[in-house]
Structure formats: structure tokens, C-alpha cells
Image (tube, rainbow, N blue to C red):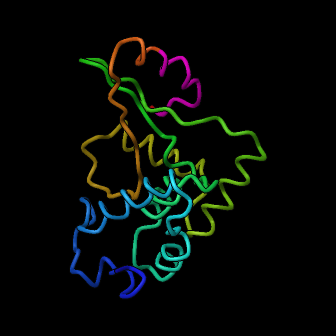
Amino acid sequence: MIYTSGLPGEKGIGADDFSGSLGYDIVLHHWSQCRSLNNKIASLTPILVPQVQEGRIEANKCAYYLEMQNEGYDAGLFSIARARFGDSTSSYFAPKYSELAKIKVNLNRRLLYLEPIDDYYEKVKYVVTHPDNKYKFDIRMNTFNMANKEAFESFLKYEAGIELK
């Protein structure tokens, strides 16, 4: 359907508030997940990148789907995560990139007209420390619900990156 009719823009379907998901988000989410496991499924990259460049979809939303496809695209979104087990929830963490990796991430971000990753982290920190703020920042953060305490503790040891708080 996307190949024959194109991707409907958020403006075109009457989306006035971008605080929630749109109808096609779940389709793109699952398509990206399937693509990550089977590279015979068509990539969304040549479809979504021009849509962002034309202002038809949010850039971070697009970057998130591109990262989910596991094609080597990294804009630093999917790796911003926290873990939850029972009543315990960790802080949000982001990876510490080497200088070369940060250059690659920022090049990927620039393709979609996104700010540099360090500036993005500042937005994430603001949202995390001001949960009732009235600003709408186009950010993506993950919460992984862990099956057991060992997995939760393992996440905390593994995620020795930048704590976003």
C-alpha cells in the first residue's frame, strides 16, 4: 500500500497533536521489526527519508524505524533506555560513543535534519527531570520490562553509558 499510494503525511490525515501514535505507526513498527529479521523484506529507508525531508513525518520517529531495521543506521535513539522489574525502575542510559562513532551518528542525524546527539541528550535530560513540562520535544525513549531480577541487574551493569538525569 505504501509503495502504490505513498505514505500519508501527518498533516494530510488531520493530525493536530503529535503526542500520540498515528494509525500507520504500528504498521511501520512491525514492518521494521520484520525487516530486522529478514532482509528480503523491502527496506523503509528509501521511503521514509524523503518523507522526513519534505516535512511529512517527525524526524525522530523516522530515525527510530530506520534503527529498528538493523541495517546499520544509528541515530542514537533506540539505545536510550531504562529497565523495569517489579517496583524498581532504573534511570535512562545512553551509550558512550567513541569520537568516530559519534561522527557517524551525527551524520545519520543530519540526513534527517536532526540536531547533534549531544544536544538531543540535553532534551532527553530535560524531559526526564521535568516530567510535567508543557514543551513537546520529538524524542524517543525505551523502557524494557525485565523478566527477573537477574536480568534487571544485568542491564544495570551492561548499561554503563551516560546516565540521563
Query: Quarter-wise, where is residue 143 in the image?
Result: top left
When the figure is inspected, residue 29 is found, relative to residue 17, above or below; the finding is above
Q: How many marks?
A: 0
Name, please, the residue furthest toward the bottom: 5
Residue 163 highlighted magenta (yes or no): yes
Which residue is at the front of the view, 31 or 67? 31
Residue 59 highlighted magenta (yes or no): no
Residue 135, image x, y percentages:
31, 56
When the figure is inspected, residue 35 is found, relative to residue 151, above or below; the finding is below
Which corner quadrant holds the N terminus? bottom left
Which residue is at the front of the view, 49 or 27? 27
Q: Is residue 84 left or right of residue 113?
A: left
Q: Is residue 77 left or right of residue 105?
A: left
When the figure is inspected, residue 107 is found, relative to residue 47, above or below; the finding is above
Which residue sits at x=50%, y=50%? 37
Q: Which residues are magenta?
A: 154-164
Residue 17, image x, y percentages:
23, 68
Residue 59, image x, y percentages:
47, 66
Name, please, the residue furthest toward the right: 100
Which residue is at the front of the view, 25 or 15? 25
Which corner quadrant holds the C terminus? top left
Residue 45, image x, y percentages:
54, 69
Which residue sits at x=44%, y=14%? 153
When the figure is inspected, residue 39 is found, relative to residue 88, above or below; the finding is below
Which residue sits at x=78%, y=47%? 100
Which residue sits at x=30%, y=20%? 85
